[in-house]
């Protein structure tokens, strides 16, 4: 179709009498516009459906973040319970050792008492000649008797403590089993939610891509037709304005030459200025290293990256196949669940799900400087929290419609996007 239109344009340029051809081109353009109108109507209906899907996606991914947080809390509780069981087991072993020792002492005393006879006091009374020695011996026997009673009492107390510890161990073990069951249930629920998200995401992406391709093709047809029609109309009026066009062309040529000289001068100046090398896609970035404690306005080139990973997209690059949209930040590939750290101290001004960015954290660093962290799996901070440089604020995920885990990281300077590579430390 486009070749036919180009041929029509060439015929118009060579033939002064082509008003009828302009009418035909206008009719084709009107037909294409009508097709586009119908496609936009269908796309509008799809957008309404998409809004509902986006709402479901927001709820699903928010719930995923909460469940991830609950799973982590349950795992921490399991560790505490296991530690308490270890402590109780150690205490039980000590009590068992004390019980064995006390049994040994009681057995020794019992044998001594048996060997001395059941009427040791009476024998002592009949055999004693010296009253003073008899009194001392009697006092000795009183002490021995009290010692036996204390040993028995201590043995009984040890048995009581041992029973309590064994009871506490049984209780902790039951609690551990209950926590493990709850953790398994939460994990199963999380898997179900993840499956639902994948289905919703697949439906959303397929529908949008199919409709968007059709609309883009029609819009391109319209652009081509409009260009041909414009050429025809300009040709029809060319004889009436040839003199004026010649003057205008000379003036434009002069202006273009001046602009070219200015561009060459600016380029020469720019070439003399050393520039910071930008990381290329696939380059490694790191969150390690010392944090910068000064004001954010002075932090250019001194900040760590928010996560360890590889660059998927640079600032200013085209987003996918659509050359009309550019990246206003960077995308960093990292493992799901990796901790995302604040590149500079600040205050959390936003921590919630946002369409297109998923679970998003925004930090205010003062004087109009903001840093953004998107597509997270879990949010570790809430709006209003104050964070320090290097403090974990979220975990890497794929929320907001992403296929693979990655972090969207951007910096805003007085409301305008700024290249994060100019603020963060270069690698190597």
Image (cartoon, rainbow, N blue to C red):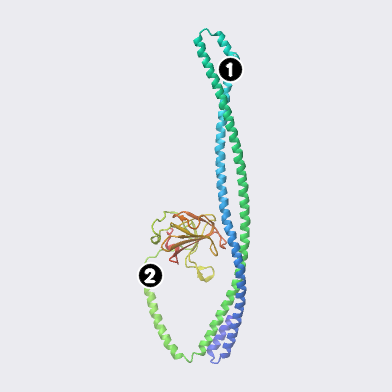
Q: Quadrant of residue 3?
A: bottom right
**Front-most of residues 418 and 70:** 70
Q: Which residue is mark 2?
A: 270
Foreground residue, 258 or 173?
173
Q: Residue at x 56, y 21 (%)?
A: 148
Write the residue at 57% across / 79% down. Answer: 222
Residue 267 position by quadrant = bottom left
Query: How far separated are the C-alphas under marks 1 and 2?
Result: 106 Å
Residue 178 to residue 347: above or below: above
Mark 1 and 2 residues: CB-CB less than 8 Å, in contact? no
Q: Please indicate, yes or no, whether residue 122 appears anywhere in the rendered image.
A: yes
Q: Which percent across, then down, holds residue 353? A: 54, 61
In this orientation, which residue lies closer to the viewer: 239 or 122? Answer: 122
Residue for badge 1: 113
Which residue is painted at 55% across and 35% down in the image?
Answer: 90
* In front of the other: 122 or 42: 122
In percent of width and height, residue 21 lies at 58, 88
For marks 1 and 2 on the same chain, the one whose residue lies earlier in the sequence: 1
């Amino acid at each position: 179709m486009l070749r036919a239109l180009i041929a029509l344009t060439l015929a118009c340029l060579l033939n002064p009498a082509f008003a009828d051809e302009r009418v035909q081109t206008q009719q084709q353009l009107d037909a294409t516009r009508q097709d586009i109108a119908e496609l936009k109507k269908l796309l509008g209906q799809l957008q309404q459906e998409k809004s509902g899907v986006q709402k479901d996606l927001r709820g699903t991914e928010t719930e995923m973040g909460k469940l991830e947080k609950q799973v982590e809390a349950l795992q921490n509780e399991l560790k505490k319970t296991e530690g308490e069981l270890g402590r109780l087991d150690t205490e039980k072993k000590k009590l068992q050792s004390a019980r064995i020792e006390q049994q040994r002492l009681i057995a020794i005393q019992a044998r001594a008492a048996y060997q001395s006879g059941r009427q040791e006091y009476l024998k002592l009374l009949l055999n004693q000649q010296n009253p003073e020695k008899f009194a001392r011996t009697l006092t000795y026997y009183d002490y021995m008797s009290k010692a036996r009673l204390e040993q028995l009492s201590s043995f009984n107390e040890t048995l009581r403590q041992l029973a309590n510890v064994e009871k506490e161990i049984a209780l902790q073990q039951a609690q551990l089993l209950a926590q493990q069951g709850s953790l398994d249930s939460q994990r199963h629920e999380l898997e179900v939610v993840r499956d639902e998200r994948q289905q919703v995401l697949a439906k959303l992406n397929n529908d949008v891509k199919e409709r968007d391709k059709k609309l883009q093709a029609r819009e391109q047809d319209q652009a081509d037709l409009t260009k041909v029609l414009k050429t025809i109309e300009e040709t029809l009026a060319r004889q009436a304005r040839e003199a004026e066009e010649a003057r205008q062309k000379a003036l434009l040529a002069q202006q273009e030459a001046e602009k070219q000289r200015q561009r060459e001068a600016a380029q020469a100046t720019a070439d003399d200025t050393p520039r910071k090398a930008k990381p290329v896609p696939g380059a490694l970035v790191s969150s390690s290293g010392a944090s910068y404690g000064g004001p954010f306005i002075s932090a250019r080139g001194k900040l760590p990256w928010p996560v360890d990973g590889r660059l998927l997209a640079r600032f200013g690059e085209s987003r996918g196949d659509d050359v009309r949209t550019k990246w206003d930040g960077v995308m960093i590939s990292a493992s799901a669940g990796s901790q995302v750290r604040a590149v500079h101290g600040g205050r959390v001004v936003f921590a919630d799900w946002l369409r297109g960015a998923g679970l998003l954290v925004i930090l205010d660093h003062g004087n109009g400087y903001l840093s953004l962290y998107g597509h997270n799996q879990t949010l570790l901070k809430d709006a209003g929290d104050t964070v320090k440089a290097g403090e974990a604020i979220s975990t890497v995920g794929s929320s907001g419609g992403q296929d693979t885990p990655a972090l969207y990281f951007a910096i805003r300077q007085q409301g305008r996007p700024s290249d994060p590579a100019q603020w963060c430390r270069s690698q190597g």
